[in-house]
Image (cartoon, rainbow, N blue to C red):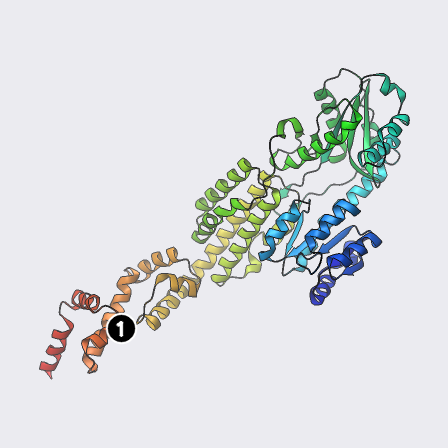
Amino acid sequence: MFKVLLVDDEPMALEALKIVADWKELGFTICGEGKNGDEALNKIKETKPDLVVTDIRMPGMDGLELIRNVKENVNQDTIFIIVSGYDEFEYAKKAMQYGIRYYVLKPVFKDEFSEVLVEIVDKLEEKYQLGKMTANNVRADIGNLLGEFLLGNLDEDELKSRMPIDIWKNNAKWFYVCLGTPQAWETANIKSYDISEDTFGILNELVNTGIEGIYIYPILTNTVLEGIVVCTISEVQTDKIIETLKSKVSKIFGEGCYLGVGNTVTELSELSESMSQAHKAINYRFFSTPGSTIFYQNIKDFSLNYSFEGIYKIEDMYNALDSLDEERIKNAIEAVFSDFRREFTAPEIIKMYVVNIIYKSIAIVSSLGGNTDQIPLLDSITGILAKSLIIDEMEKMAYEYCSKFVIYAKSIKNNTKNSDMKLVEEYIKNNYTRNLTIREISKKLYIHPNYLGHQINKWFGCSFNEYLHGLRMEEAKNLLENTNLKVHEIAERVGYSSYSNFLDQFVKKFSIKPSDYKIMLNNKN
């Protein structure tokens, strides 16, 4: 069982976290809870949880400070889930810069939250199982030493004294390799990583490249495979070493495995820099095709963009969704994802963009009177968002979701267009005697103003203003015939603040001035 710590300053929210998931069934045991960051930090040091679920805004030490403290001073491998509201996204964005990858919006729904937990369990089990399998590796001891050295727990002189002397007799070169496993997007299915029965043999094969003078050291942290150090005392080109290593690693992780490669260094003291470079390189797998090898040298001048400025195009997307025009939606998605690629927008920001699309689609279906539970792909997409998709898969997922949504929304609209007409007609007739606009009607009835203006022309055979003036003129004629109100009083009563505007509309409608019409009525009597 994996240990989870729950943190929230609100007692009710803390209780809700306890029941929002079937913790035991999912493989977790709640090892404690904290009412603020200070209390949580002490509990984390004491219980060493695998997962911490925390709010952001708390008295004293807030969630961000808690995450920073744990990552820097306790255990950088601790996984965090941030539970937060829309208005706290700026805080969540900072947390992402600490490496936090799980962000759940309040209110927390059981199905969505469970999908995230399943993803985390898969990752924890994968790391621990893989770590156990490498424990018997023929070079595991050296890998452990290198791991301690890279963590700063072992100095260079001691490391050298415990490594094979033949490496120091030659001009050894070193570089660090990070591994990354992809998740594939499918309509109703998420592919998972299965560990083969022969992985022990494969990992032992991993260190034996068959190339003389090449040494492969799996780096272990708490029995978890974190990466690979390559040491070479030969003149073999790095590309050939990587090609051989990639073939070996692919047998474990599959053909879609990514490698992030740091620069080659000649001093062990520089190996930690190569490791940092490899970590940075692997972060760019999001923008690469599955199975890519990403060299730090090729991406060193780039940096992930955590700015939320790219969301300026969210309004274009909203308008496209409102139009239910599939081609327009496709163009909007292509435009913003083109920007994401060009600006190297961080995956977490792109996920937030897709989340906004989902919530907008739900709002549209609700406004049409449809059942949001029946939106195609809605259930599966929330779980898929927790997966490590590449940007091409993310774009495909967004477009496929929107395509299915459009079909569903149009079917609802076709079934409700007559009821829409009746609602609009009734609203105008109840309010035409005051200053009434299409924007007000669209807001009250949850119909997009552009769509509403177009539909009024179809429903009533004239524009909104023509329809409005027509109703006012009929009422003005009725008041002239059946009351003793003065003409200017009638103008005000039917909604005109300008008498001249009223006069123009009356003459246009009846080809006679209202005062002359009243005289004509009196003469008849």
Residue furthest to the front:
60
In this rendering, would 456 be left or right of 214? left
- Residue at (76%, 27%) from the top-left corner? 270
Report x, y in % for residue 382. 62, 52
* Residue drawn at the location 70% of the way across and 21% of the way down: 239
Where residue 411 sits in the image (x, y, percent)?
Answer: 47, 56
Q: In this image, 317 relative to 227: left or right?
A: left
The residue type indicated by label 1 comes to Val
The residue positioned 63% from the left and 41% from the top of the image is 389
Q: Nearer the viewer, residue 9 or 310?
A: 9
Front-most of 224 and 307?
A: 307
Residue designated by label 1: 494
Residue nearest the viewer, comparing 498 with 62? 62
x then y, percent, for residue 396: 56, 42
Quarter holding the C terminus?
A: bottom left
Per the image, label 1 sits on a secondary structure element best described as loop
Residue 319 on image: x %, y %: 44, 51
Q: Residue at x 72, y 18 (%)?
A: 237
Q: Camera-side residue: 339 or 409?
A: 339
Q: Is residue 75 visible?
A: no
Q: Is residue 90 above or below residue 345?
A: below
